[in-house]
């Protein structure tokens, strides 16, 4: 049986779609090594999926890639240090659509649950106003301090320069189970997306969204009606963020909490 397009369910010929925009990979050098949850191996960064029809790929999604590359060039290309401020200037619709696209592409590639993306596929393709059951927030993370992980390290800080990823997180707050948490991070910028769990109520989902920004001061909501927000790094960010979004395959964080979990709770 012929497969249908992951975005429009149509039966046009399927094409190759880069999980991360190709222009972004040109900028970062296509050198990154990434861990694949499906194969359990580390391989190069140029992932592709082959389930997107030519119309979705070339007409609708390619515009989002151009926006992501512009945003990278103008605001995200250089990792930040400690105690910095950044005014994130954004176009809500283009930013949320391209982040959702990256998350949806990587979820399919990794074999993660894609059901929460189903109500958002039309929005990713064509926009049309902020969808219900979706929440976007941003965080400027500070560099890691290697001495907290490795006592003998000479490095004073570990910059997130060149680090990017798309992950499934867990929102460990009272209503956190009402949301699927997806994180897309590039250098110092972490974008936290909450998608309503298909069987959760809209009111529980809204509470989960409030909890995300209330529990972690440095995670800032990106309102659909605004064009900019103020972000501030704090030395606590890396730890507090990880507590809320325990990333399932980041062994160094796991090791960190195995050793220091009691002190950070
Ligand atoms: Zn399509």
Image (tube, rainbow, N blue to C red):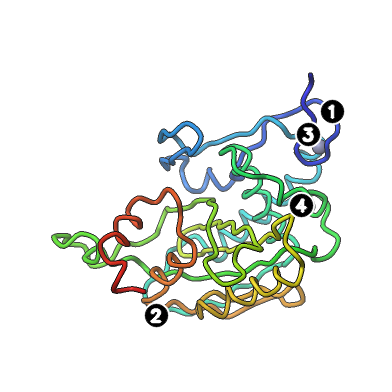
Q: Are marks 3 and 1 in contact (CB under 8 Å)?
A: yes
Circle 4 residue: 124
In the image, the residue with mark 1 has its CB under 8 Å from the nearest atom of ligand 1: yes
Q: State the CA–CA distance, disc 2 to disc 3.
A: 45 Å
- Give x and y (percent) for residue 103: 62, 50
Circle 3 residue: 5
- Give x and y (percent) for residue 117: 72, 50
Which numbered disc, 3 or 1, marks the residue closer to the eye?
3
Q: Earlier in the sequence, mark 3 or mark 1?
A: 3
Circle 1 residue: 12
Circle 2 residue: 83
Q: Secondary structure at mark 1?
A: loop
Name the residue: 59% across, 73% down.
Answer: 88
Quadrant of image for the N terminus: top right
Residue farthest along the top direction in this orientation: 1
Name the residue: 21% across, 62% down.
Answer: 155
Toward the viewer: 238 or 114?
114
Identify the disc placed on residue 101. Answer: none
- Give x and y (percent) for residue 178: 66, 63
Q: State the CA–CA distance, disc 3 to disc 4.
A: 14 Å
Q: Earlier in the sequence, mark 4 or mark 1?
A: 1
Q: Residues within 10 Å of mark 1 (few under 14, many from 20)?
A: some
Q: Earlier in the sequence, mark 2 or mark 4?
A: 2
Q: Secondary structure at mark 2?
A: loop
- Give x and y (percent) for residue 5: 78, 34
Which numbered disc, 2 or 4, marks the residue closer to the eye?
4
In the image, the residue with mark 2 has its CB under 8 Å from the nearest atom of ligand 1: no
Q: Earlier in the sequence, mark 3 or mark 4?
A: 3
Name the residue: 43% across, 67% down.
Answer: 243
């Amino acid at each position: 049986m012929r497969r249908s397009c992951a975005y429009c369910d149509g039966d046009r010929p399927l094409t190759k779609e880069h999980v991360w925009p190709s222009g972004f990979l040109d900028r970062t050098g296509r050198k990154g090594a990434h861990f694949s949850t499906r194969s359990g191996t580390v391989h190069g960064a140029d992932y592709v999926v082959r389930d997107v029809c030519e119309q979705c790929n070339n007409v609708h999604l390619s515009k989002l890639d151009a926006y992501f590359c512009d945003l990278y060039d103008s605001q995200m290309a250089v990792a930040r240090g400690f105690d910095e401020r950044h005014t994130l200037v954004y176009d809500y619709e283009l930013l949320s659509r391209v982040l959702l696209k990256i998350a949806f592409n990587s979820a399919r590639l990794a074999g993660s649950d894609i059901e929460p993306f189903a109500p958002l596929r039309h929005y990713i393709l064509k926009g049309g106003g902020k969808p219900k059951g979706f929440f976007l927030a941003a965080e400027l993370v500070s560099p890691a301090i290697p001495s907290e992980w490795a006592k003998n390290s000479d490095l004073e800080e570990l910059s997130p320069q060149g680090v990017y990823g798309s992950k499934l997180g867990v929102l460990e707050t009272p209503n956190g189970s009402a949301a699927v948490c997806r994180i897309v991070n590039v250098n110092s910028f972490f974008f936290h997306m909450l998608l309503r769990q298909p069987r959760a109520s809209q009111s529980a989902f809204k509470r989960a969204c409030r909890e995300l920004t209330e529990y972690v001061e440095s995670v800032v909501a990106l309102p659909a009606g605004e064009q900019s927000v103020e972000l501030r790094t704090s030395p606590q960010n890396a730890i507090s963020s990880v507590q809320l979004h325990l990333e399932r395959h980041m062994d160094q964080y796991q090791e960190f909490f195995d050793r220091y979990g009691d002190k950070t709770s």
